[in-house]
Image (cartoon, rainbow, N blue to C red):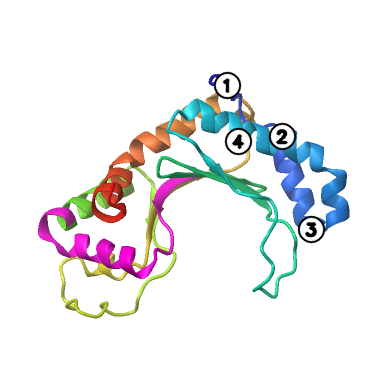
Amino acid sequence: MPGTFTGFPREAITFFKGLEANNNRDWFQAHKDTYERACREPMQALMADLRLGPGKISRINRDIRFTPDRSPYKTHIAAGVGGYYVNLSAEGLYVGTGIYKPDPPMLERFRGAIDRDASGRQLHAIVKALERKGYDVGTHESLRSAPKGYRADHPRIDLLRMKDIFAGSAFKPAAWLSTRKALDEIQRVMRDTQPLTKWLAQHVRGR
């Protein structure tokens, strides 16, 4: 119900520290109640209180079919809602927005919007404004040269070389994460990064 999020209990950080050291089924089953109470239930309450629509909370189980890492569990809990992303782990809390490794058609829309003068200049201004506020703006992967079909001397070549984009803030574990102030901080980041969320919705996601 709305109004029920009061932060992430300190046990959540302790739980993920323990999981990092004991990533196996026996340990997880012995501490599953802590995960549900201190991690998953608060994230569900947060999604309700944000009132941005239905949130999608990640599963704790990892897909180990195509990776040499056989660890069965993720060492974080994440949720997406309204174009925003929230992640809690032993390192603390991350809140941000962006697109993550888009498929080829979406990546081409992203580059096309950067290339066009009006939308490209708008994104450049959004990025600079966020950086001035101290937000981390970047990409998970960048090309070494201009993408095919674009000039190497393009005025926004740094943006064009990005294969995705994100903007957000990371918060180290602190007492306020276990209070209602956590909601205020999360909403502040979402308000500040909203211009990027809206730009992506209009020019890339098509909604």
Which quadrant, please, contains the N terminus? Answer: top right
Disc ID at residue 23: 3
Disc 1 versus disc 3: nearer the observer? 1
Disc 4 versus disc 1: nearer the observer? 1
Amino acid at pointer 2 = Ala
Q: Earlier in the sequence, mark 4 or mark 2?
A: 2
Name the residue tied to disc 2: 38
Q: Residue furthest left?
A: 117
Amino acid at pointer 4 = Met
Task: Find out whether residue 40 is within the magenta segment.
Answer: no
Q: CA distance from mark 4 to mark 1?
A: 12 Å
Q: Earlier in the sequence, mark 4 or mark 3?
A: 3
Q: Earlier in the sequence, mark 4 or mark 1?
A: 1
Q: Range of the magenta residues? A: 95-119
Name the residue tied to disc 4: 43
* SS of the residue under disc 2: helix
Asked whether the residues under the numbered discs 3 and 2 touch, taking CB atoms below 8 Å apart as contact, a structural biologist would say no
Q: Looking at this view, is 61 or 87 the one in front? A: 61
Q: CA distance from mark 4 to mark 2?
A: 9 Å
Q: CA distance from mark 3 to mark 2?
A: 18 Å
